[in-house]
Structures are given as structure tokens and as C-alpha cells.
Image: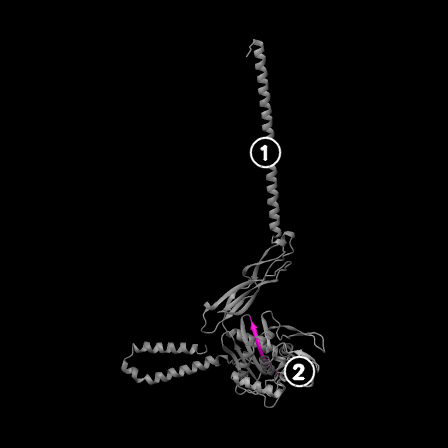
């Protein structure tokens, strides 16, 4: 993808020369044929250099890190680089490689016995105890969420029997990834003389590590319930966010703000934009401001397509046991998709999914579903859908999916039908009584007529 711009430029240059050949005499064309060829080669080389890394170099960006690389996974481009080939001790970021090697070797449900060496690592926040049995999964959470040296040491000892064999495997894995100059001498990132890495090399390690499902899953968690052990009760681990925002999510190692020099090897998800950020020897006091500057810069340099618009109606969500059975869902934020340079907008599509277990009561602003943004078959962004009204618990008919409003309408219609039935019955009864009266009068009239006829016959003496 990075050669796309160069290929396009070559095409236009070649096309322009083709146009010249139609208007310039063929004998003149031969005179500068060689010059034109050399110029074309020069253009290609300059274009390749610019697309690969040159476009990421910024004259006005001033961050405290000695070395840095910011890479956009969506577009496949480096959007920022500073001393990317400078060799520096990876420090705490070493634990990303430790986790990668451990997860490839150890089953998650295996219990690891904490050694004296692991339990006595300096300034460890996890507080593991010698002789404690902890699962590999919990140790991985300790490494990736708290940066625990004790957990990293325990994993190293358990996977290959000792730390030296584990670090040999770390170096072998780094070479397999393509990082020939990387050297690890421990699993914790404690400063060591020969332990060195470049930002460009660690970018490769970070990308491979987070392509692993287990590491990616752990990285996406904001907290983890550490299981009970034979030595300690359950405790809760919480990830520290360097920037708190609804649109930003960090995974990986995000550095230590209280440290004079800290390392960062993190994934950043920012409204559809996925960045890999490597900062080596970053000033901890400037970590937050430098990270904001880098994210703002990346956003300004990358062309995102607005696919979902904030406040736009996105469908209806079904509500169980509510005074309303359906609520309108609206996009909570704008949603973007980022494409490689050769990517087509036709690859972008959206899919709306409402929560299946949505149950009253619901408050305005509650999330009722999500709009997923795809590039091809891959989900690249997820926009929450919210309702803008309160929905209380409904009456009894709501338990069979009938809203309060519908219940009222049904009652009104039922009452109206009952009234009509009563009116019809009343009319029919009245008509029946009327017919009976008419029949009675008719019978009386016929009886009187018969009496008169009989009297007339007697008066005249008729025998018939």
C-alpha cells in the first residue's frame, strides 16, 4: 500500500512524456531520452522514500521522548517518527514481549507456584507471596494491567524453567518477527547494559503481540477480578487511564507519569482510528500532554470518512416490560472509518444491532444498541446508540408486549364496542317490544272485528 502513491506518480509522469512524444520531433526526443529516464528513476526513489516514512516526520512537533513512532493500523502508514532507529533500553515495555512469549507457551488455566525470586521483586504492586498458586491468566493480567515484575518473573520461570531460557526465547521470537537488532536480557525491563531496542523494531513486536487473541482481550479490559489463591483473597485490578475520554481507549503499556523516564508501547483506539504508539525515554511529567499532541496530530494527518452522524436516528429498540414497547435510537457520537490510500469507500458499510435484553425502566441517555462500522469484513468502529426519553415500567399487559398507550387504545375500543353492543341490544329489544305491541293491537283489532261480525249475523238472523 505504501507504494501506491509512487506508482500513481510514475503513471502521470509517463503519461506526460507520452503526450510530448506526439508534438516533439522524434529526432529531438532521442537527444534527451537518457536524461528523461534518469529523471523518472529519481522521481520514483523520492516518492518511495516520502510514502514510507518521510511523510511522518514533523518539524514542529516537540515531544520529550528520545525516540518515537506512531503507526496507523487502518491506513498502514507511519504518521509520526522521531529517531526511530535510535537504540534504547525498552524498560517497562519489555513486558509486552514477556506476555507474548508466555501466552504462546503456557495454557491459561495452569497454576504457577510463585518462587522466592518472583515474590521479592522490588516495588511490585501486585503483592504476590512465596508459595502462592496463581493461574497463568491472572499473571498475564498482572503483567499487562499493572506491569507487575513479580508476575513477569513467575511466567518466565514457569514457561522454560529459568529466566535465561525464557529470554533466549524472547530474542528468538524478536528475530522471527523481523527485529534482528533487538536484545532482551530480562523479563521485567529492569535497566540492563546490553538490553536495547529501537522504536521501529518495537512497533513490529507490538503489532504481533496484539494480534494474539488473549493479549488483545486482556488489553481491552478496564479491570479484572483476581481469583482467590491459597495465600490471598480475591482482589480487583483496575487499569489506569492516562487520558480519560469516552472516545479514547488505551491498551498495552501506557507508561508511568511519576517516572523521570518512562516507556510506552500502546494501542490507542480513537473513534475508528487505531494507532500503535511507541515512546522510548519519555518524560513522565509530559506523558499526558505529549500523548494528546500526538493523537491530535495523527487525527489531522489522517483522512477519516464520517459514516455515522451524531444525533441521527438509527432505528427502534424493543423494550421489555415498559410503558412503551419501542424507543427510537440515536447515534451518541460521530462515527468514522479510515481507509488505506488505495482503499475504496465502497468497502465501508454499517450494521445496527439493538440490545436484546433491554428492559424498563430506561433513562434518557442510556445505551440501547450499537452501530458497527465495517471496512470489508472487519469491524473498525462501534458507535453507541442512545435513547432520548425516559421509559418507565409498564402496566400488566406490558409483560406480553403491550405498551401503556396501546392498552389505553384497546380499553377505549373495547368500551366503544361494548357501548355499541348495548345500543344494538337496546334497539333490538325496543324493536321487539314494538312488534309485540303491534301484534297485540292487530290481534285485538281482529278480535273486535270478529265480535262485530258475529253481532251483525245475530242481528240479521243469519245462520251461517
Left or right of 119 in this view: 81: left
Name the residue rendered at 66%, 82% in the picture. Answer: 150
**Main SS of residues in magenta:** strand
From the viewer's perspective, is residue 439 above or below residue 147? above
x then y, percent, for residue 52: 47, 80
**Which numbered disc flags the more N-terminal residue, 2 or 1?**
2
Label 1 belongs to which residue? 428
Q: Is residue 187 magenta?
A: no
In the rendered image, the quadrant that contains the N terminus is: bottom left
Front in this rendered view, residue 361 or 355? 355
Which element is circle 1 on? helix
Work out which residue is located at the far bottom of the displayed protein and give it: 193
Q: Position of residue 92 (x, y in %)?
A: 62, 83
Q: Secondary structure at mark 2?
A: helix
Which residue is at 59% across, 13% downward? 455
Task: Tell me if 10 is positioned left or right of 433 in this view.
Answer: left
- Residue 4 visible (yes or no): yes
Q: Which residue is mark 2?
A: 150
Q: CA distance from mark 2 to mark 1?
A: 93 Å
Boundaries of the magenta span: 261-270
Position of the C terminus, as image quadrant, is top right
Foreground: 231 or 383? 231
Q: Position of residue 339 (x, y in %)?
A: 48, 72
Nearest to the observer: residue 242 or residue 349: 349
Say few, some or many: other residues with alpha carbon within 10 Å of mark 2 (under 14 / 14 to 19 / 20 or more).
Answer: many
Crowd class of label 1 (few under 14; some 14 to 19; many from 20; radius 10 Å)? few
* Residue 409 coordinates in the image, percent (x, y): 60, 47
Q: Is residue 404 above or below residue 378?
A: above
Tell me if residue 263 is in the magenta stretch.
yes
**Rendered image coloring scheme:** one colour
| Disc marking residue 260 | none
Q: Are marks 2 and 1 in contact (CB under 8 Å)?
A: no
Amino acid at each position: 500500500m505504501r507504494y501506491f502513491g509512487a506508482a500513481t506518480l510514475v503513471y502521470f509522469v509517463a503519461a506526460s512524456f507520452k503526450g510530448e512524444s506526439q508534438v516533439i520531433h522524434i529526432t529531438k526526443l532521442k537527444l534527451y531520452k537518457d536524461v528523461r529516464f534518469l529523471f523518472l528513476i529519481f522521481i520514483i526513489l523520492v516518492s518511495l522514500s516520502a510514502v514510507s516514512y518521510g511523510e511522518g516526520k514533523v518539524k514542529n512537533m516537540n515531544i520529550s521522548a528520545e525516540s518515537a513512532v506512531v503507526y496507523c493500523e487502518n491506513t498502514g502508514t507511519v504518521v509520526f517518527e522521531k529517531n526511530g532507529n535510535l537504540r534504547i533500553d525498552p524498560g517497562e515495555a519489555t513486558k509486552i514481549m514477556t506476555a507474548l512469549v508466555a501466552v504462546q507457551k503456557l495454557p491459561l488455566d495452569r497454576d504457577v507456584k510463585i518462587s522466592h525470586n518472583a515474590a521479592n521483586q522490588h516495588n511490585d504492586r501486585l503483592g504476590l507471596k512465596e508459595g502462592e498458586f496463581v493461574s497463568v491468566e491472572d499473571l498475564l493480567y498482572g503483567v499487562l494491567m499493572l506491569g507487575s515484575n513479580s508476575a513477569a518473573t513467575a511466567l518466565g520461570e514457569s514457561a522454560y524453567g529459568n529466566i535465561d531460557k525464557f529470554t533466549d526465547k524472547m530474542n528468538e521470537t524478536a528475530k522471527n518477527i523481523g527485529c534482528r537488532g533487538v536484545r532482551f536480557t530480562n523479563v521485567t525491563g529492569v535497566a540492563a547494559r546490553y538490553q536495547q531496542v529501537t522504536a521501529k523494531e518495537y512497533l513490529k513486536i507490538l503489532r504481533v503481540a496484539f494480534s494474539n487473541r488473549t493479549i488483545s482481550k486482556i488489553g481491552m479490559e478496564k479491570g479484572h477480578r483476581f481469583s482467590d489463591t491459597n495465600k490471598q483473597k480475591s482482589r480487583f485490578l483496575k487499569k489506569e487511564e492516562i487520558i480519560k475520554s469516552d472516545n479514547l481507549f488505551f491498551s498495552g503499556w501506557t507508561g508511568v507519569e511519576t517516572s523521570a523516564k518512562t516507556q510506552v508501547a500502546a494501542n490507542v483506539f480513537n473513534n475508528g482510528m487505531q494507532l500503535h504508539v511507541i515512546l522510548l525515554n519519555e518524560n513522565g511529567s509530559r506523558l499526558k500532554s505529549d500523548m494528546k499532541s500526538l493523537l491530535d496530530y495523527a487525527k489531522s494527518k489522517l483522512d477519516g470518512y464520517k459514516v455515522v452522524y451524531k444525533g441521527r436516528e438509527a432505528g427502534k429498540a424493543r423494550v421489555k416490560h415498559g410503558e412503551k414497547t419501542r424507543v427510537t435510537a440515536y447515534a451518541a457520537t460521530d462515527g468514522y472509518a479510515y481507509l488505506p490510500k488505495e482503499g475504496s469507500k465502497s468497502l465501508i458499510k454499517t450494521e445496527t444491532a439493538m440490545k436484546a435484553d433491554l428492559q424498563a425502566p430506561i433513562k434518557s441517555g442510556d445505551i440501547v444498541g450499537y452501530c458497527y462500522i465495517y471496512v470489508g469484513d472487519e469491524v473498525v468502529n462501534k458507535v453507541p446508540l442512545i435513547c432520548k426519553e425516559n421509559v418507565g415500567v409498564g402496566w400488566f399487559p406490558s409483560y406480553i408486549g403491550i405498551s401503556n398507550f396501546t392498552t389505553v387504545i384497546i380499553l377505549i375500543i373495547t368500551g366503544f364496542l361494548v357501548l355499541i353492543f348495548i345500543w344494538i341490544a337496546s334497539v333490538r329489544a325496543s324493536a321487539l317490544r314494538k312488534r309485540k305491541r303491534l301484534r297485540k293491537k292487530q290481534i285485538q283489532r281482529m278480535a273486535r272485528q270478529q265480535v262485530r261480525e258475529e253481532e251483525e249475523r245475530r242481528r240479521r238472523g243469519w245462520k251461517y
